[in-house]
Amino acid sequence: MPEPPHLEFIADLTVTLGEPLVVGPTPRGLHRIIPITGGRVEGPKLKGVILPGGADWQYIDATGTTDVDARYTLRTSDGVLLGITSRGLRAGPPEVLARLARGEAVDPATYYFRTAVRVEAPAGPYEWLARAIFLAQAERLPDTVRIRLWQVC
């Protein structure tokens, strides 16, 4: 039997956000689109900036749980463009989720915000990213999301 997987830290991402666009209620829940306006990436395996133009397509169900589907572009410090797809969820006690919805700073230990991340990368020094699965732990702040990214090895 092979050894169980382990996690290797890749980078911290700080993603800046625009005002939510509320599509409205749907059978899946309240549909919102959160514009991604920029950001930065700093870590031992990846450095760069997040370009404006991406978004997080969210559905919020009756319990307040948010289904996250974020897609955006990262430009590495040496100019290579990477496509990022991050799918996951944010859940927690109703009072904590209400505070997040009001834009308040909330201790990230009081709610669950995790995603699975895939990277689209061209041939070259970053193609290893396209052949790996990544897990992220996120923290929602009033106008940013902080993300810690690990590779599943």
Image: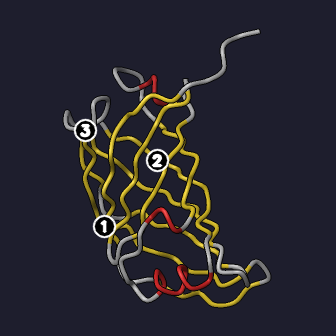
> Of residues 10 and 53, which is closer to you in this image?
10
Instruction: Specify which label sits upstream in the sequence, 1 or 2.
Output: 1
Of callouts 3 and 2, the N-terminal one? 3
* Quarter assignment of residue 63: bottom right
Circles 3, 2 touching at the beta carbon (< 8 Å): no
Nearer-N-terminus badge (1/3): 1
> What amino acid is labelled 3 in the image?
Lys
* Residue where numbered disc 3 is placed: 47
Location of the C terminus by quadrant is top right
Q: Which amino acid type is marked by label 1?
A: Thr
Foreground tag (3 vs 2): 3
Q: Position of residue 151 (x, y in %)?
A: 49, 32
Please state which of residues 114 and 56 is positioned toward the viewer in this rendering: 114
Q: Residue 81, percent across and down?
A: 33, 41
Judge whether 140 appears above or below 76 on screen.
below
User: For numbered disc 3, what is the local secondary structure?
Assistant: loop
The residue drawn where x is 70% and y is 10% is 2
Residues at marks 3 and 2, CA–CA distance in whole angstroms = 14 Å
Front: mark 1 or 2: 1
Q: Quadrant of residue 135?
A: top right
At numbered mark 2, what does the secondary structure look like: helix, strand or loop?
Answer: strand
Residue, x 33% and y 61% (percent of image)? 15
Crowd band around label 1 with a 10 angstrom C-alpha radius: few (<14), some (14–19), many (20+): many
**Residue underneath mark 2:** 84
